[in-house]
């Protein structure tokens, strides 16, 4: 009992220290809390799995700093959760649909589960999504144009072509850096937000796909207010109170 209490107390203090500093190394935390670096690594791993901080090589970042990692790093974060979310999202796609995929890593996780769907039309600003569908000749892929953003391997800004106006989109899937009832789906890069807003406007059904770390966070700008949001697919660690509030606003929430 005493050990468990000290463990929980130390981990809470680690979160507080990270909140204040933004980033700390294993060595700094070991010195501060007078425990071994092995113990600190175990603490950080446990807190990372709960989505309470972000592990880095040799330390950790406060989850509230919301840094933008490379696409490859973000793809590895919460990978099992993203796979389950991707599989659940794919069930909303049907033969003959026109769908929109944004350039988030969680949306990327949908791609393996839609490759056998016939007569599908995909609109995406993600170069990764387009490349992932090269081996599916039965799926048409349209890129809306825009400026290249290397961090997300995507086309951003206002779409350059009229493809969004010419097609009736059944459903669109969007990742986000944050989700709250007040601000809806938010993201950090304004050019990325501009593209997402244009895509959201064309969707009959807007689906947010994001892991539990994103709930309660607010990034720089909203691209999908709650009134535009039909469904959110997340993992079972999503905070129950926030899930309930979203459902009160008639947003369907699917937890996997």
Image: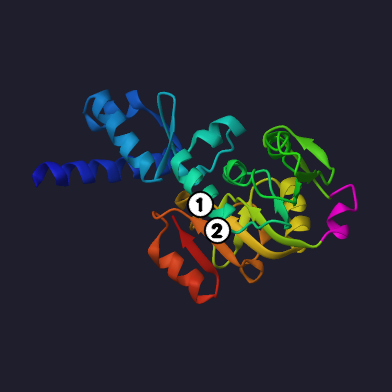
Query: Which residue, given by chain and number where applicable, does mark 1 sit on?
Result: 214
Which secondary structure lies at badge 1? helix
Query: Helix or strand or loop: what does disc 2 sit on?
Result: strand
How crowded pointer 2 is (Cα within 10 Å; few <14, some 14-19, many 20+) is rated as many
Q: Residue at x 57, y 64 (%)?
A: 231
> In the rendered image, which quarter is residue 46 located in?
top left
Instruction: Please provide the residue range marked out in magenta.
Output: 159-167
Q: Residue at x 50, y 34 (%)?
A: 76
Q: Residues within 10 Å of mark 1 (few under 14, many from 20)?
A: many
Horizontal and vertical percent for residue 256? Answer: 44, 55
| Tag 2–tag 1 contact (CB < 8 Å) | yes
Q: Relative to 254, is 102 on the left or the right?
A: right
Q: Give the Cα separation between the discs numbered 2 and 1.
A: 6 Å
Q: Residue at x 73, y 57 (%)?
A: 96
Residue 7 painted magenta: no
Q: Spot the residue most to the left.
A: 1
Labelled disc at residue 179? 2
Query: Could you tell me which residue is drawn at 40 percent across and 31 percent down?
Result: 24
Q: How far across and how far down the image is residue 244, in percent?
A: 44, 70
Query: Mark 2 vs mark 1: which is more N-terminal?
Result: 2
Does residue 244 appear left or right of residue 206 in this picture?
left
Numbered label attached to residue 151: none
What percent of the width, then of the height, locates residue 215? 49, 56
């Amino acid at each position: 009992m005493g050990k468990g209490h000290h463990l929980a107390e130390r981990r809470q203090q680690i979160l507080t220290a990270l909140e204040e500093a933004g980033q700390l190394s294993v060595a700094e935390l070991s010195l501060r809390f007078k425990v071994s670096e092995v113990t600190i690594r175990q603490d950080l791993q446990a807190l990372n799995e709960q989505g309470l901080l972000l592990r880095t090589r040799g330390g950790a970042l406060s989850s509230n700093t919301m840094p933008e990692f490379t696409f490859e790093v973000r793809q590895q974060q919460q990978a099992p959760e993203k796979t389950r979310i991707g599989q659940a999202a794919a069930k909303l796609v049907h033969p003959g649909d026109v769908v929109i995929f944004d350039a988030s890593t969680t949306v990327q996780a949908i791609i393996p589960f839609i490759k056998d769907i016939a007569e599908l039309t995909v609109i995406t600003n993600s170069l990764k999504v387009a490349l992932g569908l090269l081996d599916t000749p039965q799926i048409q892929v349209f890129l809306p144009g825009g400026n290249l953003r290397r961090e997300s391997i995507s086309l951003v800004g206002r779409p350059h072509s009229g493809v969004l106006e010419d097609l009736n989109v059944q459903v669109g899937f969007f990742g986000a850096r944050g989700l709250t009832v007040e601000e809806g789906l938010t993201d950090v890069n304004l050019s990325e937000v501009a593209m997402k807003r244009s895509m959201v406007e064309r969707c009959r059904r807007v689906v947010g796909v994001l892991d539990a770390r994103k709930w309660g966070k607010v990034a720089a700008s909203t691209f999908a207010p709650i009134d535009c949001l039909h469904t959110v697919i997340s993992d079972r660690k999503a905070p129950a109170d926030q899930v309930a509030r979203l459902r009160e606003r008639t947003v369907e929430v699917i937890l996997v």
